[in-house]
Amino acid sequence: MTVSFSDRAFDTREPNQPATVSVLLRELGMAHACVEKQRVALGTWLMIHEAQRPLRISLLKNGYGLLLKQVDAKRAKAGALA
């Protein structure tokens, strides 16, 4: 079976994660998608993976701070319910 970049991006066992939002968008196959589709893809990825510090910084510097805040709130709420 061939694994594509997008499959690798959603593999939670992947030890290394992209350090920048542009690399993550490329891995998700969303580099040239409209901003709304990119936001949805990033939100989905962030609900599955906990962004490490370099990626969080890149998200903040590239205008995804609100998305990051929303995902963090959803994860905290889900954790409180568990």
Image: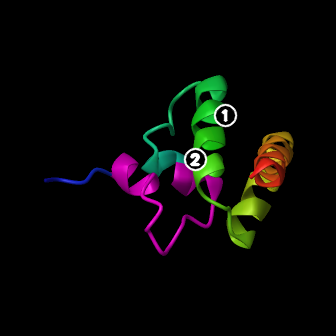
Helix, strand or loop at mark 1: helix
| Residue 7: x %, y % from top left | 35, 50
The amino acid type found where label 1 is placed reads Arg
The magenta region covers 5-24
Residue 39: assigned label? 1
| Residue 23: x %, y % from top left | 53, 56
Q: Residue 64 falls in which quadrant of the image? A: top right
On screen, residue 13 versus residue 37, left or right, reads left
For label 2, the residue is: 45
The amino acid type found where label 2 is placed reads Trp
Instruction: Return the residue nearer the eye: 62 or 76.
Output: 76
Q: Residue furthest front?
A: 82
Q: Is residue 33 above or below residue 66?
A: above
On screen, residue 62 versus residue 5, left or right, reads right
Q: Nearer the viewer, mark 2 or mark 1?
A: 2
Helix, strand or loop at mark 2: helix
Q: Is residue 48 above or below residue 70?
A: below
Q: CA distance from mark 2 to mark 1?
A: 10 Å
The colour scheme applied to this rendered structure is rainbow
Based on the picture, tell me whether residue 8 belongs to the magenta stretch: yes
| Residue 52: x %, y % from top left | 69, 69
Q: How many marks?
A: 2
Point 50% across, 33% down: residue: 32
| Residue 9: x %, y % from top left | 45, 54
Point 53% across, 28% down: residue: 33
**Mark 1 surroundings: few (<14), some (14-19) or many (≥20) residues within 10 A:** some
* Mark closer to the chain start, 2 or 1: 1
Based on the picture, tell me whether residue 15 belongs to the magenta stretch: yes
Point 43% across, 40% down: residue: 29
